[in-house]
Amino acid sequence: MDENKDFQLELDRLLSGSIVPGESQTEAGWHSLWMGSTVSDHAPLVVSLVGGALADRLAWVFHAGYQGMIRCAFPFCPREGWASYLVAEDKTGEKPGTVITKSEARVSLSGFKNWVAASEHVNHLFVRVRCPDEDIVVLVDSDEPGVKLNSRDETGFLAELSQGYALFEDVTVRDDRVITAGDLPANFALSEPHHVLTSLNAFMISHTIRLDGDPETVSAAGSALQLAGDLIRLSGDDFLLGIADFDAVTTENARQFEEFVKSRDNELFQRWQRDHGLINMFSRGLQKKASQLLEQ
């Protein structure tokens, strides 16, 4: 299905109250809810929308947007299961960075990556590797020989989401699972805020409806999601300015939602307060880039 049409259909379902948030106190519960639904059947931005609407906390809001972002960046991402994009390496130099070794018989991956989202349940790992000419991204599955994942004991921000690290020991990489960084979508650098903020607005709508909240709050977040859908068609400077506008509108929607939830659902409010940093995670960089562009 066309992504724009798919997005509009699911947005209409969301606004009608047909997508109801679930209860997932743990990542295992969130995983069960996700796998038991049809989230992954949708186009990337719709994955973010539907996933965010199902979430009951900001850790899952981020994760839903993150899954949509990865599927946007890598159209060959397997539909089933969760994926993670591995970029960060050990800044201390104690752990070796990732390297690719090529021979006539095979391509192999070795080294260390310092951050893996949903490390306890992730299935597919997109690993960015620095190369002399151009970075490449390789896809390996978490259960392949030579792949070792570990989760950190304490994470702080978005604490319910397991966050770990990966060690690769001579892992075979299939030829059809290698792309250059230059093959990533033109909007890739701003894809994460596009998808995560979409997930956040969907979350605010589904919970406002669940709590029989103010229709104006639903309408404001719905308008923000219409903007998110329109951005699919844009690129370059227009996309940047559109994302900055989307971020600003979402920030205001979040302020209104917080006031509403504080008086209606204390448990949800406490979870919201704990991970409140997600709301402005992208704002400083986005608004600075947009201001610089407008000043040119």
Image: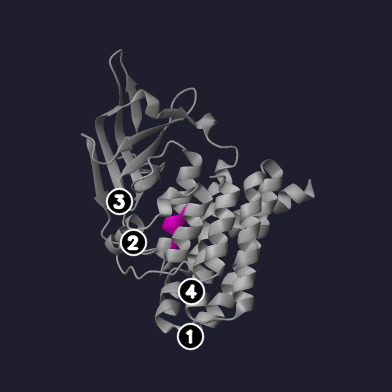
- Determine the CA span between mark 2 and mark 4: 17 Å
Q: Which tag, 4 or 3, sits closer to the chain's start?
A: 3
- Residue corresponding to mark 2: 33
Tell me if 11 is positioned left or right of 288 in this view: left
Q: Quadrant of residue 159?
A: bottom left
- Residue corresponding to mark 3: 119
**Amino acid at pointer 3:** Ser
Please say if 55 is above or below 142: below
Q: Foreground residue, 245 or 275?
A: 245
Element assignment for label 4: helix
Q: Which tag, 1 or 3, sits closer to the chain's start?
A: 3
- Determine the CA span between mark 1 and mark 3: 34 Å
- Determine the CA span between mark 4 and mark 3: 27 Å
Within the magenta stretch, is there residue 123?
A: no
- Residue 207's disc is 4
Q: Which residues are magenta?
A: 61-65
Q: Which tag, 2 or 4, sits closer to the chain's start?
A: 2
Residue at position x 31%, y 29% in the image = 109
State whether residue 295 appears in this view: yes
Please say if 277 is above or below 207: above
Q: Residues within 10 Å of mark 2 (few under 14, many from 20)?
A: some
Element assignment for label 1: helix
- Residue corresponding to mark 1: 264
Residue at position x 60%, y 37% in the image = 186
